[in-house]
């Protein structure tokens, strides 16, 4: 098999076991005689798939009965609009800006109401998470929005801000299912699935029930959480195959021991890379140590030519998609749940060798 180690930020590698199971079932799922791709979303086979997917997500994330799990489309980017449209009452909200994605989210919310920027780390190219204290947040905000893990810059919140009784909304596109979280601390968690859950096309939103049903009048039917909550995510045709893949990924994760176990693996993998970066005289990490992401690890050398050479030679060695985001440059290794420990070990070995050869 000629599979590479794929460090893409998303869509990204999926667990081989899940892909192999999908391959086996691709042409005929169970006794249905057809592919999941060909199946009516109203069929009992598909209903079982989506029910199983929801049950696994609820188990893995320990989601309480007072939350709806919604299978949506339009990417995390559509949530940037859905959140304000559904949560605005006073039309006032607090955003913390920790990267391009939170800026985009804040801009979208600003189309419908007043966005207060509580704090921003843009002054240092989003290389840290700002210090946040309870008194910084508005008491009458409809919600507070954070980007839990910043895919491009490689930072994450290691503690959650104290927002009092105001609902906390988190974009967890690049951290969902990677570490233990207390869902009860959030009003809404949303994530584009194409990093840690499934192929592209599915967006998962975990929404506290009391936040459903108060959307602004201008809200399009498809952007109202109530529409999807009332119809079991089947108001229209959901992304059936991506939901099926999500269920296979969740099964894999569950078998592995769930979030607690994958978090240990993720900490180990990230540790291998960060330890090397801290000891290297050629490569260095780009963000404050205390805010380092477990999922996205950006790094640089001090020369653009060396960066380009590294990316090219890494690719020749089966380590692909290591080019950093265009706004940061350098390299970025995205090491989501499905990246095997061996892939990170190979990368670190290759970096060591490259450093020796290019001194
Ligand atoms: N938020 C974060 C943190 C992301 O990493 C991304 C995608 N890279 C997005 C939002 C946008 O997601 P989508 O493409 O699903 O709209």
Image (tube, rainbow, N blue to C red):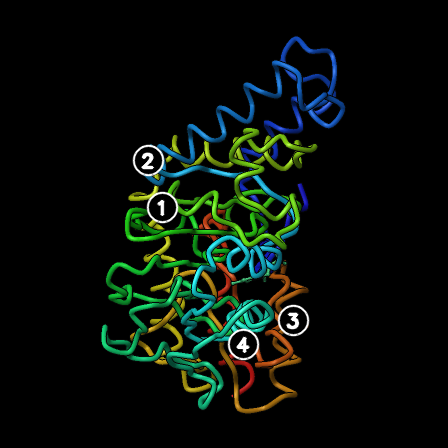
| SS state under label 3 | helix
User: Where does residue 252 sit, x and y in percent of width and height?
Assistant: 46, 33
**Looking at the image, which residue is at 66% across and 40% down?**
1
Identify whether 140 is placed above or below 255: below
CB atoms at circles 1 and 2 under 8 Å apart?
yes
**Looking at the image, which residue is at 67% across and 24% down?**
41
Residue where numbered disc 4 is placed: 354
**Residue 345 seen in the figure:** no
| SS state under label 1 | helix
> Considering depth in this image, is 348 or 39 the residue closer to the camera?
39
Q: Earlier in the sequence, mark 3 or mark 4?
A: 3
User: Where does residue 194 sit, x and y in percent of width and height?
Assistant: 59, 50
CB atoms at circles 3 and 4 under 8 Å apart?
yes
Residue where numbered disc 3 is placed: 313
Asked whether mark 3 and ligand 1 are closer than 8 Å, the reply comes as no
Give the side of residue 284 with respect to residue 44, left or right: left
Residue where numbered disc 1 is placed: 262
């Amino acid at each position: 098999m000629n599979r590479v180690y794929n460090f893409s930020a998303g869509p990204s590698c999926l667990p081989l076991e899940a892909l192999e199971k999908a391959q086996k079932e691709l042409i005929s799922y169970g006794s249905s005689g057809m592919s999941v791709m060909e199946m009516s979303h109203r069929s009992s086979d598909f209903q079982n798939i989506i029910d199983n997917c929801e049950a696994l997500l609820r188990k893995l994330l320990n989601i309480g009965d007072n939350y709806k799990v919604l299978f949506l489309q339009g990417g995390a980017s559509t949530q940037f609009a859905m959140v304000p449209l559904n949560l605005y009452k006073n039309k006032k909200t607090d955003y913390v800006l920790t990267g391009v994605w939170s800026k985009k989210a804040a801009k979208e919310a600003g189309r419908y109401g007043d966005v207060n920027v509580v704090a921003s780390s843009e002054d240092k190219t989003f290389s840290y998470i700002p210090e946040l204290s309870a008194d910084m947040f508005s008491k009458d905000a409809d919600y507070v929005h954070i980007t839990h893990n910043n895919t491009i810059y490689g930072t994450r919140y290691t503690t959650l801000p104290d927002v009092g009784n105001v609902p906390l909304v988190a974009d967890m596109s690049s951290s969902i299912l990677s570490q233990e979280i207390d869902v009860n601390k959030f009003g809404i968690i949303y994530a584009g699935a194409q990093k840690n859950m499934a192929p592209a096309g599915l967006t998962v939103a975990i929404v506290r029930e009391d936040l459903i049903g108060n959307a602004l009048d201008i809200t399009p039917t498809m952007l109202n959480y109530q529409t999807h909550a009332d119809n079991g995510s089947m108001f229209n045709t959901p992304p059936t195959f991506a939901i099926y893949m999500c269920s296979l990924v969740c099964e894999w994760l569950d078998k592995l021991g769930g979030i607690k176990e994958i978090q240990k693996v993720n900490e180990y993998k990230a540790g291998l890379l960060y330890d090397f970066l801290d000891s290297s005289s050629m490569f260095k990490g780009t963000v404050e140590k205390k805010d380092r992401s477990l999922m996205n690890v950006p790094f640089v050398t001090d020369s653009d030519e060396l960066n380009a050479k590294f990316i090219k030679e890494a690719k020749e060695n089966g380590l692909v998609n290591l080019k950093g985001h265009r706004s940061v440059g350098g390299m970025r290794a995205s090491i989501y749940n499905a990246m095997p420990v061996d892939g990170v070990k190979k990368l670190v070995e290759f970096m060591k060798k490259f450093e020796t050869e290019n001194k």
